Structures are given as C-alpha cells and as structure tokens.
Image (cartoon, grey):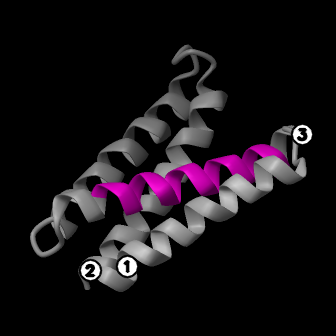
Amino acid sequence: MAWLLLLVAGLLEVGWAIGLKDTDGFTRPLPSLLTGLGMLASVGLLGLALRSLPVGTAYAVWTGIGTVGTALLGIALFGEPADAARLACIGLIVLSILGLKLVA
C-alpha cells in the first residue's frame, strides 16, 4: 500500500509542477489554488508512505517520478527539447527508481 501511495504522490508532484506554469507566478487564483492543493496532497501522501518506507528511498522515488513525469510532459506539452542525451538521462532516472524499488 505504501508504494501505491508513493506512486500517487509522485504523480501529483508532476501535476503541481506542470500547474506552476499555469499559475503565472501565482497571479491566477484558480490555477494557483489547484496547484497548492496538489502540493499539499502530494506531500501528504509522501508522509503517509513514509510510515513504512525508508525516507531516503521514498524521497528519491517521489522526486524521480516527479522529475521524469515533468520532463516528459515538458517535451509533450511545451515543446522542450527531446534529444537523445536528454531522453537517455530520463531513462537513467527511471532505471534508478526501479532499482530503488527492487532493493527496498
């Protein structure tokens, strides 16, 4: 169950990271509110997952999910570069997340 909470927390991190772009520096009320709620929910679920997962592993996986998801959505939604080196680095992060899951 802790791993599922951590996965959802990581996906929410992707949501709020992408949402930050829509807040326009927190000048737009609704996107700002939704982004803030996403932040709270993400950190809250991370805290629940930490009840049974090691903090180093859980935090690394949480930030890894957020990093990979945000980078991929940046490519898909905002036309950010998708060159081979960048994709290879994203792949290394995915491998690291899987490795941490396997050794936990």
- Disc 3 residue type? Gly
| Amino acid type at image mark 2 | Ala
Q: Quadrant of the N terminus?
A: bottom left
Left of 81 or right of it: where is 47? left
- Looking at the rendered structure, the secondary structure element under dot 2 is loop
The residue at the point 65 percent across, 30 percent down is 22
Residue 79 numbered mark, or none: 3
Question: In the image, is 10 to the left or to the right of 44?
Answer: right
> Residue at (90%, 47%) from the top-left corner?
83
Label number found at residue 104: 2
Instruction: Looking at the picture, tell me which residue is in the foreground, 26 or 83.
Output: 83
* Snapshot quadrant of residue 24: top right
Image position, residue 97 (x, y; %): 47, 69
Q: Secondary structure at mark 1?
A: helix
Residue drawn at x 42%, y 68% is: 8
Q: Secondary structure at mark 3?
A: loop
Which label belongs to residue 101? 1
Q: Which residues are magenta?
A: 59-76
Q: Earlier in the sequence, mark 2 or mark 3?
A: 3
Instruction: Give the alpha-carbon distance from disc 2 to disc 1, as whole Å.
Output: 5 Å
Left or right: residue 76 compared with residue 93: right
Q: Are marks 2 and 1 in contact (CB under 8 Å)?
A: yes
Determine the CA span between mark 3 and mark 1: 31 Å
